[in-house]
Amino acid sequence: MTATPSTEQVQQALATVQDPEIHRPITDLGMVKSVDIAEDGAVHVGIYLTIAGCPMKGRIEKDVAEATRKVDGVTSVTVELDVMSDEQRKELQTKLRGGQAEKEIPFAKPSSLTKVFAVASGKGGVGKSSVTVNLAAAMAARGHKVGVVDADIYGHSVPRMIGASDFPTKVGDMIMPPTAHDLKVISVGMFTQGNQPVVWRGPMLHRALQQFLSDVYWGDLDVLLMDLPPGTGDIAISVAQLLPSAELLVVTTPQQAAAEVAERAGAITAQTHQRITGVIENMSYFLPPEGGEPLHLFGEGGGRTVADTLSKTLGTEIPLLGQVPLDPRLRVASDEGKPLVLSDPDLEVSKVITGVAESLAGKPRGLAGMQLGISPAGR
């Protein structure tokens, strides 16, 4: 006869269940309300949801039941859902903020190990957003923890390109971002009705960006990518103020007219004292399906011109990180919400973007450089 399972055994099983949005064990988050075990092996588990009407409650209930059933001696499982009190939610927020009760931008702290890249362009239509999304997806596919901020307030398009159809969940004054393709993403488009335009001036734009950075629970990211609006307006200035350590990636196309505008977008760093990581030339050439020489439909040399000019202007070497070919499949994949680097990684365009992503992100850091809070035992 199988022995009746212990509370400790059930708790150990529940520790394998992660909250789908926070991605941490429910036992660490204070979500396990109770565990009652009858002599016949029937187990009743009480679970606290973070909010009433939690969109993930069905998945949590299912995962809890499945994990509990795996414990030897369990004959049946009943899961009862409850909702955290305001005080419990505040405790959870403090825990997620690393013990800090007040809001702060984690990426602006000197101890932050997250690489922040602000993707900029001088003008619209150069493919900045599709480059951002595919860079992020390529990094995530190689084991990095990646977040994407759609900071293009007026022309937000990242959620569609990533395939993020879910809405953020609010836990008190903390926002849980939706996830798609292992990418956490937040966009103003998730807070507007339908396809309504955003009619905001500078202070509102600054506050929105500040909330995306401080109110959203990003967790421990390796890389944060920010898709900026074209040009050198309010958002670019706000990024410099809120995240002075953010590095710029300048996206341009080969034609000289676009290159001249891109140079201005990069040269803003001379005033904001930020670093430019490099230049990415998009739509560099077209590879005919039947083979043959690459066709330079939009001219040649724009990316190299931008990199050379910025190097002279800023007095430091600015590399041309990659030349991304023009491929209609990149546009199709973006419309379908399936980053091309994931759906068709063997294409030339995917290989180029993946190469740039690897040069930017390096290797997943794991525990390297993290403070574990270990101190010598007292004597």
Image (tube, rainbow, N blue to C red):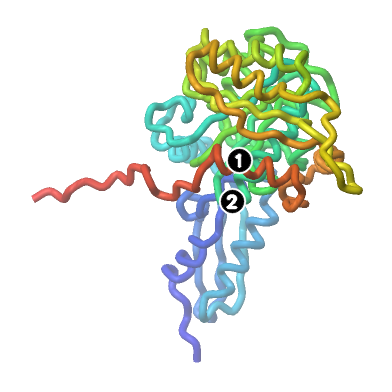
User: Mark 1 packing: few (<14 Cα in 10 Å), some, or many (20+)?
Assistant: many
Q: Quick one: which residue is furthest to the right in this view?
A: 290
Q: Depth check: 47 or 13 in front? A: 13
Please give the name of the residue rendered at 46% of the width and 84% of the height, measured from the top-left corner. 3
Count of number-bearing discs: 2
Q: Quick one: which residue is furthest to the front in this view?
A: 293
Q: Which label is found at residue 142?
A: 2
**Percent position (x, y) of residue 345?**
73, 51
Q: Amino acid at mark 1?
A: Ala
Give the mark nearer the N terminus: 2 vs 1. 2
Residue 205's place in the image compared with 289, above or below, is above
Q: Which residue is mark 1?
A: 357
Q: Amino acid at mark 2?
A: Arg
Q: Is residue 147 left or right of residue 29?
A: right
**Percent position (x, y) of residue 374?**
26, 47
Choose top left, top right, bottom left or bottom right for residue 206: top right
Q: Depth check: 354 or 78 in front? A: 354
Please give the name of the residue rendered at 65% of the width and 39% of the height, measured from the top-left corner. 135
Residue 245's place in the image compared with 41, above or below, is above
Between circles 2 and 1, the one closer to the viewer is 1
Please give the name of the residue rendered at 51% of the width and 50% of the height, measured from the top-left corner. 24
Residue at disc 2, secondary structure: loop
Choose top left, top right, bottom left or bottom right for residue 75: bottom right
Q: Assess whether mark 1 and mark 2 are in contact (beta carbons under 8 angstroms).
A: yes
